[in-house]
Amino acid sequence: MSDSAALDSFLDKWRARWPEWSVGEIFVVPERRDIAVAWFALLQEFDDALNVAGDPLPADAKLAWWGEELRGWAARRSRHPLGRRLEPVRADWARLADALPVLSEGRAQPADRDAGFSALSRYGEAVMAVEAGVLGDAPGSHAIVVQTLAMRLAETGAAGIPVDHLQAGNDAAAARAWAASLLAEWPLREGACERRLVSAYAHGRLRRLAQRGEPAPLPSRASLLFTGWRAARGG
């Protein structure tokens, strides 16, 4: 497989996970779309390692590999197809590499809300620093951690809910309560246009989960278009 085809396969994998983007990308300047998708595809790799089910050793090995790869990007030596697009960006790749072990620790079920945020704070700060270089702006680290925890809830269910929430009722009720708590802390107007779009769509997924206690189907294309328009204009 050529480098270009390998890169396209990773970008397409992310697009398949986030079909909302095919609607919202109309609000993104065309020449910025590929680098935004490459960045979000990279973050998806880390989300997948955080939210792995079963034996964590392969995911931990993958995170260690990514740490070496990101340090290589800092020295202009990439091996992964995503590096072909992201490595030229002047960003603190080494800082992100240093923060990846946090994701292994972040799999432990937190005792409460504060423990959940604290476990991923270093990772959120590193993502914020790099995203400012990649997209020219970034949300605060708190917003990044909120979105990461939201994705963890959607992917792992009860394993992503703090213990104190689980003690209050059944899993569905606990999921709704934790989702509502995250929604209340999620600032949507921060960061570059591309981040605001993805955050708005992720926020919508979490809002539907909060209503049902489980992931729900996507709304209509017209609804997604309106959500994207509001996010792009910062509203």
Image (tube, helix red, strand yellow):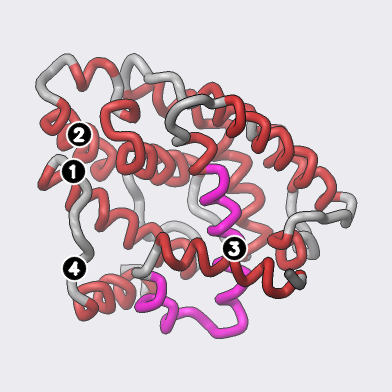
CA gap between label 4 and label 3 equals 25 Å
Instruction: Estimate the spatial distance between the alpha carbons at disc 2 and disc 4, rounded to whole Å.
Output: 20 Å
Checking the image for residue 219, the label placed there is 4
Q: Are the residues at dot 1 and dot 3 in contact (C-beta closer than 8 Å)?
A: no
Q: Name the N-terminal-most of marks 2 and 4.
A: 2
Q: Amino acid at mark 4?
A: Pro
**Magenta-colored span:** 21-46
Q: Which mark is residue 67?
A: none
Sequence-wise, the earlier of marks 2 and 3 is 3
Q: Which mark is residue 175?
A: 2
Residue at image coords 20%, 20%: 166
| Quadrant that contains the C terminus | bottom left
State the image coordinates of residue 48 (x, y, percent, origin top left): 50, 42
Which x, y percent locates residue 111? 34, 14
**Horizontally, is 152 left or right of 4 in the view?**
left
Spatial separation of the CA atoms under disc 2 and disc 3: 30 Å
Q: Nearer the viewer, mark 2 or mark 3?
A: 3
**Badge 1: residue crowd in 10 Å (few <14, some 14–19, many ≥20):** some
Q: Is residue 43 magenta?
A: yes
* Residue at the spot of label 1: 214
Q: Which residue is mark 3?
A: 10
State if disc 4 and disc 1 touch (CB < 8 Å).
no
Spatial separation of the CA atoms under disc 1 and disc 4: 15 Å
Q: Are marks 2 and 4 in contact (CB under 8 Å)?
A: no
